[in-house]
Structures are given as C-alpha cells and as structure tokens.
Image: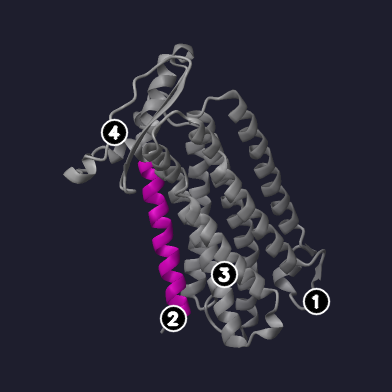
C-alpha cells in the first residue's frame, strides 16, 4: 500500500510530463505548418521535454519502489544509495531543464521581435543563462570528492562546498533570471502605438510564464527548510524532501507548457467564441512601413490574437509569413 506522499509523487510525475508532451506536440504541429518550419527554439524546448520525461520517470520509479515519499529510517542501505543517486541526477536534470527553457524563450523572442537593440539585450541575457546553467552543472558534478561518495558514502563523503547553501543560492538566482526573461519584451510592447486594452492583452500573454516563478518560489521555500534538517523530525523531513522533489518537477514541466503557449495562437482561432467576447475584439490596425504594430484580441486568457509587423519593406515574404503565423 502506497503512502500519501508516494501517491502524490506518482500523480505529479505522471500528469506533469503528459501536459508538457501535449504542449510541445501542439507547438511542433504549428511550427511544421509555417513556411520556415521548426526552428532552434522548438529544438531546444523538445530537448528540455526529453530530459523532463526522463527525470519524471525516475520519480515514478522511486515512488513505486518505496524509495521516495517514505521515512528515511525505513530505507535499506541499497535504497538509500539509490535515493541519493537520484537526488544527484535530479539536480543536474532540473537545472538543465530550467536553463534550456529560458534559452528556448529567448530564441523565440529573437524570432518575433526583429529589433536590433532588443536582440542585443536578448543575446546578453542568453549568454548569462547559458553561463549560469553550465556553472551549476559543473558545480553539481564536482560537489563531492570522489564524485560517487555523494551517494555511496553519505556519512564519510568530503563535500567541496556547502551543498545546501549552493542549492538555495542557485534557486534564488533562477527566480531572478525567470523574472528577467519574462520582463524582457515588456518595454517593447509598452512602446507600441496601440490602444490600452490590446497592450494589456499582449503583456498578459507574455506573462503567462509567471506561474513558473511561483513554483520556483515554493521550491525555494522547501530548499531553505532543508538547510535546517536538524530542526525537522522524521515525518517533517520526509514531507519537505518529497515536496521539494515534486515542486522541482512542477516548475520544469509547467515552464515547458507556458513557454509553448504564446506559439499556439493559430490554434486559438478555431475556438468558438461567445458573442459578448467577440464584441470586445478590436479591428486590426492598418499596416505601415518603417513602423512596429501589434494587433491583440484579448479573450480572457482563452483566445489571444497578436500580429507584429515590423518594417515590412525590409522583410522577405517568408519572414513575414512566419511572424504572422507564430504570433497571430
């Protein structure tokens, strides 16, 4: 009979990757219909999904085998080693996923906002994200000396640094980077000459990833609690460790979903709309060269249509078609 913690872990690690798979599949379906086809942004998010599926599969295995979500004192020596090895791998996988998602979003920004100054900011942030992700990976790989002592000899292992503080700091920086990535396109949107309703709708669609910041904050809460394991009894330690694992996977999979949502605008068109909502939809602004325009139809989070046409006289037909399909 599985405990409540094991059941929660199983449910999360089954449902979350399924949602991510659906989101990425829809995104790829839309991309294949575009003239330019699948781009680097789609390849990166697909790679993140593959890693997320593998990570959640480890969670399913550990929960079903009684390694995750059970009191630590009930674990055999072999199961404890398996648990610590999975923690080691999970940290590597999750932070790689977080980094890949940010990279995918930034590549998507570059594609739909062909503005030189914006590209410079996006490229700078892209380098920061890549450097941060690589540094976490290297630091996690070298946390113990020798490496396998992390899971083989937890009592005798020599840590090269305070691992719990490391996890707290990296989680905090990850939240800051999430906010930075989400806020990056907002000045561009605010500067556009469109009515207030459409501008708010455009901002909302780009802030859908805010839930990943919330899940990151919840995960940080549990990471901080793990700093003080000496203050936790066995039941509390099990709850905190299991919750930290679940919310790490929530952040990974939900971030994949929210990263895909802005690319699915062509699918939103087919959703039948109530007459009242349709009445809120404004007419498209007329196109003009050497200008930047956004046409946004806000359907209370269900249907959002946006069209960004930037300096049409300088774009090739293929580029214009891609922008119209991706964000319309």
Q: CA distance from mark 4 to mark 2?
A: 50 Å
Circle 4 crowding by C-alpha within 10 Å: few under 14, some 14–19, many from 20 = some
Q: CA distance from mark 3 to mark 4?
A: 44 Å
How far across and how far down the image is residue 209, in percent? Answer: 48, 50
Q: Which residue does the image show at 60% across and 62% down from the upper left?
A: 90
> Which one is in front, 176 or 63?
176
Question: Tag 4, which secondary structure?
Answer: loop
Question: Pointer 3: what residue?
Answer: 244
Callout in the foreground (3, 1): 3
> Which one is in front, 191 or 14?
191
Q: CA distance from mark 2 to mark 1?
A: 32 Å
Circle 2 crowding by C-alpha within 10 Å: few under 14, some 14–19, many from 20 = few
Work out whether mark 4 precedes mark 2 in sequence or the reverse, and give the earlier one: 2
Circle 1 crowding by C-alpha within 10 Å: few under 14, some 14–19, many from 20 = few
Q: Which residues are magenta?
A: 3-27
Question: Pointer 1: what residue?
Answer: 156
In the picture, the disc for residue 47 is: none
Work out whether mark 3 precedes mark 1 in sequence or the reverse, and give the earlier one: 1
Look at the image and tell me in which quarter the N terminus lies: bottom left
Question: Pointer 2: what residue?
Answer: 4
Q: Which residue does the image show at 71% across and 44% down from the upper left?
A: 131
Residue 318 sits in quarter: top left
Question: Pointer 4: what residue?
Answer: 282
Q: CA distance from mark 4 to mark 1?
A: 67 Å
> Which one is in front, 252 or 190?
190
């Amino acid at each position: 009979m599985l405990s409540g913690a094991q059941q929660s872990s199983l449910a999360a690690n089954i449902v979350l990757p399924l949602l991510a798979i659906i989101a990425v599949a829809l995104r790829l379906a839309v991309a294949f219909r575009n003239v330019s086809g699948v781009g680097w942004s789609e390849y990166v998010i697909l790679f993140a999904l593959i890693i997320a599926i593998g990570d959640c599969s480890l969670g399913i295995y550990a929960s079903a085998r009684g390694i995750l979500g059970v009191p630590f004192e009930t674990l055999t020596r072999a199961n404890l080693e398996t648990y610590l090895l999975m923690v080691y791998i999970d940290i590597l996988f999750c932070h790689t996923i977080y980094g890949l998602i940010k990279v995918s979003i930034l590549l998507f920004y570059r594609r739909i906002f062909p503005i030189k100054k914006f590209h410079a900011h996006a490229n700078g942030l892209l380098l920061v994200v890549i450097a941060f992700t690589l540094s976490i990976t290297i630091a996690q790989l070298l946390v113990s000396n020798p490496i396998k002592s992390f899971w083989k000899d937890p009592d005798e292992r020599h840590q090269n640094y305070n691992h719990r503080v490391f996890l707290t700091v990296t989680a905090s920086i990850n939240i800051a980077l999430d906010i930075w990535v989400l806020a990056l396109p907002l000045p561009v949107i605010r500067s556009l000459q469109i009515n207030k309703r459409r501008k708010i709708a455009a901002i909302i669609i780009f802030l859908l990833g805010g839930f990943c910041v919330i899940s990151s904050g919840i995960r940080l809460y549990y990471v901080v609690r793990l700093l003080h394991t000496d203050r936790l009894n066995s039941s509390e330690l099990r709850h905190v460790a299991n919750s930290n694992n679940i919310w790490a996977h929530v952040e990974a999979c939900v971030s994949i979903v929210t990263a895909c949502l802005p690319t699915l605008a062509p699918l939103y068109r087919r959703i039948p709309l109530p007459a009242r909502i349709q009445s809120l939809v404004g007419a498209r602004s007329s196109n003009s060269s050497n200008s930047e325009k956004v046409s946004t139809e806000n359907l209370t989070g269900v249907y959002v249509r946006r069209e960004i046409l930037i300096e049409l006289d300088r774009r090739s037909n293929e580029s214009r078609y891609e922008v119209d399909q991706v964000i319309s």
